[in-house]
Amino acid sequence: MQKNRTLIEKIYLFLKGLAMGAANKVPGVSGGTVSFVLGFYEELIYSFQKINGKAFKLLFNGRFRSFFNYINAQFLGLVIAGSIFSYFSVSLVLDYFLKHYELYVWSWFFGMIIGSIWYIGKDFGEWNFKNTFSLVIGAAVGVGISFLTPAGENDNLWFVFICGIIGVSGMTLPGLSGSFILILMGNYVLLLVDSVNALFGVLTDIFSGNFEFIDDPERIRYLKIIGVFTAGSAFGLVSISHVLGYVLKRWHQIVTAVIIGFITGSLGIVWPWKEKVFKQVGGDFLLDQNGNKIVENYKRFLPDLSVDTNWYAIFYALVGILLILGIDYYGRRKTS
């Protein structure tokens, strides 16, 4: 699948990776859904699936050009580079907007996911009993996950490795938010906020010639954590992609029906109108290592339409839907 791409195609791929990476960091939003909507999901799965024994044999035999062509390295490199860059750029902007304009951001994502359900389902084909049953199963799992209660933080390195495997599933499974799963496992702040910020600080120090971080045990701890998390993520990407590649090839419609159901069922996670319910013990709020209250779950409610901000939120939801429709229109024009 490796091919020569124009500069514009390379920029588009990088930007798609940027969007997927930013989505992966936002709880409730799936990077896999973004890749599905932007039209590179199956190539992503196919490329990760090519990281296998044959690929390593080519690499160890020094056949580097054949290795890069075999694993579709140009595509993977651009998408992954965009995803990594987003953690230190776009995702920081998203963190800011989630902090100051949370209702509008969730409304925008809610609209995008509704648009994504239509986008994925519009060319589905026949809805027979088997496909409909698969849809219902996917929806039931999505609803069930959205009402689970998060666990406490755990920095055991084996558990962090498992978090990497499960957390990265958001890149490969549309509708499943890796970030939300990390919240349920209790390690979202540790892995996607504290460790990423620590890594960014270390990289900044290295580029400025400052290596004092070597003597800081807390920063070394975070580097170990993010290193193990990255290793788990890489292992998860390859292993899950092999499984997905297999099932997509043999049961494409059934898997797609499950994905549509799962995305639909998980809409409750990104429902804009909700209040945080914090963990308490004996009337006292539990705090994380940074002194922030630990979220236990969310209390969802219907919007009060007499409040102007709720109308603004509905507007942003419509913007999210129109954005997906625009992407679909652009894709159809490009292929026609």
Image (cartoon, rainbow, N blue to C red):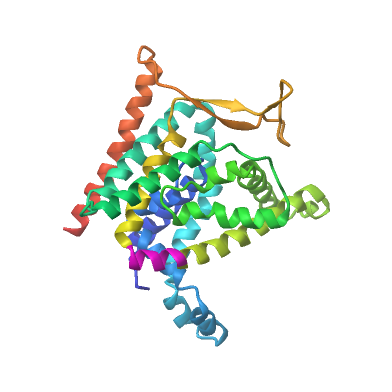
Q: Indicate yes or no whether the magenta region holds residue 301.
A: no
Please tell me which residue is depicted at 31% across the width and 33% down the height of the picture.
319
- Residue 69: x and y in percent read 42, 77
- Left or right: 80, with 118 as reference point: right
Q: Which residues are magenta?
A: 243-251
In front of the other: 69 or 142: 142
- Residue 9: x and y in percent read 34, 61
Res 98 seen here: yes
- Residue 271: x and y in percent read 43, 31
- Residue 18: x and y in percent read 45, 51
Above or below: residue 60 compared with residue 212 = below
Asked where in the image residue 10 lies, by quadrant, the reply is: bottom left
- Left or right: 220, with 318 as reference point: right
Above or below: residue 128 compared with residue 250 = above
Please tell me which residue is depicted at 67% across the width and 51% down the height of the picture.
199
Please tell me which residue is depicted at 50% across the width and 54% down the height of the picture.
169
Identify the image quadrant of the N terminus: bottom left
Residue furthest out toward the right: 215
Please tell me which residue is depicted at 36% across the width and 52% down the height of the picture.
258
Asked where in the image residue 109 lies, by quadrant, the reply is: top left
Residue furthest out toward the bottom: 61
- Left or right: 143, with 166 as reference point: left
Residue furthest out toward the left: 336
Magenta segment's dominant SS is helix
In front of the other: 16 or 183: 183
